[in-house]
Image: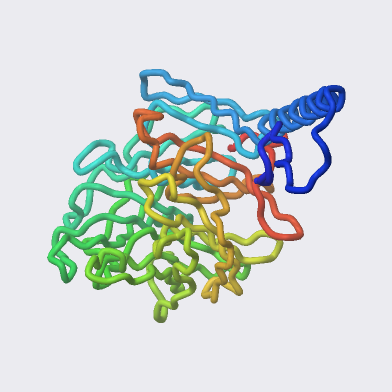
Amino acid sequence: MTQLDARPGDAPAPQDGGPEQATRAERRRAARSRRRRTTGLMAGVVALVMVVAVVVVASGAAHSGVGAQPAPADAPAGLVLTGRSMPDPFVLVVGSSTYLYTGGYGPGAAPHLPVREFTDLEHVGDPTDAMPTLPSWSWGWIWTVDVDQTPGGYVMWFTSKSTTRKDPNGALSQCIGEATSTSPLGPFVAAPQPVICSQWGSIDPRMFTDTDGQRYLIWKSDTNADHTQFIPTPILSQKLAADGTTLVGSPVQIAVSSQRWEQGLIESPDLVVLGGRYYLFFSGNQATTPSNGIGMATCQGPQGPCSDTARAPFLASNSQGRGPGEESLYQQDGVTWLLYSPNAVFGSYLYRPLAVARVSDGPHGPYLSTFGGAVPG
């Protein structure tokens, strides 16, 4: 935003040794000139606001269904769905079918793992439960779900607290588990024990398939759970076997929180390829504050290294919701969609809404673009 050196209508301060006091006619001419400048500036501000404003269309209905419509063609983002909480959104595309997964609503709350099959994000119905039976090690709440199709069926990676493992402070550790199913709608059957659970916990798994077909699992080491010292959070990557459930080799650190706006915290990593280049999207700063944003780093490959040089988030708090929160991206019909669920809503909605933006690739990398008539799904 351009900052003006003086407020509209401010006259220059008189200087010592300046000209004689202006005549009455000169003062009238100066006043008219100031009014013209002020009117022009205000018109410019109004035009700027109209160009950059994001129109939020919320259903506001007191039911579990949702409804929305695309933003106008000149808006940089698009849909906001309300009416039911949709934290940690993730979309899986299988042929002509599209599935929306979100995190659970709380410990023991049903459905444990909400999934919705939809035609487009203007018409999303009620969820079913993709994991009606939780693993015995989970404390009853699942979030940050990622699903992919493999030759043997569907594989899911997810986050939950473990009732059997504790961090050095004695708190229950957050761990990463995996589950399988023959259908994207479930039921998914989880492994009897968590797969990844480092000293301070591990969260936010995302699968990535490279252009050569090699799969990787990317996640965050939850080092910020150690409240006795400041440790910038790292993002790790490890190869997966073709079955999507077997880790191969050892994990490699590909990124770490490095920018001031992140305040030492990056999480919810999601690696994508746009224009033949690798980009790591992530959530930075505390998710429950308006200072939270969605960041982006450039990577040399699925095992890094990734370079995070941006001094500001790719997407910050906006009129779709404050604290964009944990994001994910998916591609369909040549369009890349960015999903997020604002966390720092502070009464704007009863629940965390689902917000959707469109990402395009340009000479200088990814940017938020207009919908151009496209509808997610």
- The image position of residue 57, as x and y in percent, is 54, 25
- The image position of residue 237, as x and y in percent, is 45, 71
**Is residue 185 in view?**
no
- Is 370 left, or right, of 185 in this rendering? right
Q: Residue at x 45, y 70 (%)?
A: 256
- The image position of residue 65, as x and y in percent, is 41, 24
| In the foreground, 112 or 85 | 85
- Is 36 left, or right, of 298 in this rendering? right
From this view, report whether residue 61 is shown above or below residue 8: above
Quadrant (top left/top right/bottom left/bottom right) for the C terminus:
top right
| In the foreground, 298 or 261 | 261
| In the foreground, 369 or 274 | 369
- The image position of residue 317, as x and y in percent, is 50, 43
From this view, report whether residue 241 is shown above or below residue 127: below
From this view, report whether residue 180 is shown above or below residue 347: below
Quadrant location of residue 82? top left
From this view, report whether residue 14 is shown above or below residue 157: above
| In the foreground, 35 or 231 | 35
Q: Residue at x 53, y 34 (%)?
A: 319
Q: Residue at x 64, y 48 (%)?
A: 359
Q: Residue at x 40, y 80 (%)?
A: 250
